[in-house]
Image (cartoon, rainbow, N blue to C red):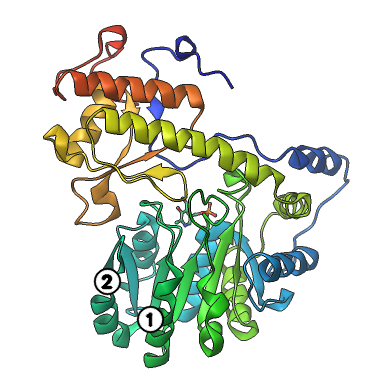
Amino acid sequence: MTTDLRSVPADRVLDLGLGDPAHPMPPVVSDVLRKLADRPSLGYAPPGGLPVLRRELAEKLVRVNHLDADGRGVVVTNGASQAIAATLAAVCAPGSTVLLPEPGYPAYRAVCRSLGLRTVGYRVDEAGPDWDVLERAASGAAVLVWNFPANPTGMVADPAWYPRLYALLEAHRQLTVVSDEVYEELCFDAAHRSPAAGAGASADRFVSVFSFSKGHAMTGFRVGYAHAHADLAARIARTHYALSMSVSTVSQLCALAVLRAGDEHPAGHRAALLAGRDRLVTGLRAAGLRVETPQAGCFVWPDVSASGLDAETWCRTLALRLRVLASPGTEFGAQSGSRARLSFAVPAEDLAEAVRRIGSWAAAGWSADHAPADHAPAAQGGVR
Ligand SMILES: Cc1ncc(COP(=O)(O)O)c(C=O)c1O
């Protein structure tokens, strides 16, 4: 992959708004797809997933995540998205309360809204979750969504927080934790530990959610999986069946091959992301913005207030004048109006060009009229 800036046309829109890894998918996937092309037919996969995939995922959950797992507790879903939606639908009744991290992944709120669920946000910062809010709100809640490594902050949970989480579950026996661990493979500076692993008697109150999307750069295959104790897993599998019957057999066979191929691909992917992270953090700091170095994931979460702009204006100007897409913090929670989220899971040359454009904007005093001389917008009036 070249970082020659001349390879990026000056007026090209650079999309740092989504976390869709630019890294190539694992090579073993192409072999599986070629072989499947010669099969005369391919039927439905069984509900809950191909038995061999469920079994081997359970082995991975034991080996990597130290969960007490077997295939009966694994449900293969259309991405982690469907694992979360099916769990909420299986566990909650309309009007139930769900506790959501703030800042947090916007789809949590969207799925709760579509299922008629009430949400209560709890702040998460470097010191951890806001336990006061959690302890107050837990008595009326059906589900606590827990997301580490976190989107958008890239924070990894400190295992020192876990005893308090287990105590919360002990005190509120109606509560189920959905632990969204889709960024587990993308840890740079801290190790991820699955909270269900040390939960003892509370372990059966966790639904642990994983995905092939991020760590294996396979977003388009839509393979995720949930692990829960066997009874809860059966309820989630029934809901998943009602929603979509099963996950594409093609995608499941590709996921199985990737699982068997071991860690080589995530390690290469992680190294490429680490270089991108450092480039983006360094570039934003050079532009005068405050930004913590994310420990994991594929996003940085700078505070843009040094620009004199709120995040919505900063992102809008960045899109319309500099043709770089980023997400304003308000999409992740009401209290994040000074933050923006930018992805570094993009081609290295796009990232270098985005950093250059942001640097030139900072050098021009963050002027709303700024368009760097060498890439005046091709058309006024917005980014298509
Ligand atoms: C925290 C989090 N959970 C879940 C998902 C959805 O993952 P999947 O592609 O497996 O549905 C995303 C995607 O961006 C995410 O950031």
Sequence order check, earlier mark of 1 and 2: 2
Q: Residue at x 37, y 64 (%)?
A: 114
Q: Height in image: 238 above or below 244? A: below
In the picture of the structure, the residue carrying the numbered disc 1 is 164
Distance from the alpha carbon under mark 1 to that under mark 2:
11 Å
Give the quarter of the figure containing the N terminus: top right
Q: Quadrant of residue 363?
A: top left
Q: Quadrant of residue 344?
A: top left
Taking the image as shown, residue 272 lies to the left or right of residue 145, namely: right
Q: Which mark is residue 365?
A: none
Where does the image place residue 201, in percent across and percent down from the top left? 54, 90
Q: Residue at x 45, y 81 (%)?
A: 176
Taking the image as shown, residue 77 lies to the left or right of residue 98, namely: right
Q: Amino acid at mark 1?
A: Arg
In the picture of the structure, the residue carrying the numbered disc 2 is 130
Q: What element does badge 1 sit on?
A: helix
Q: Height in image: 145 above or below 352? A: below
Residue furthest left as drawn: 308
Judge the density around disc 1: few (<14), some (14-19), many (≥20) Cα neighbours within 10 Å: few
Q: Residue at x 74, y 37 (%)?
A: 27
Where does the image place residue 191, in percent across and percent down from the top left? 52, 59
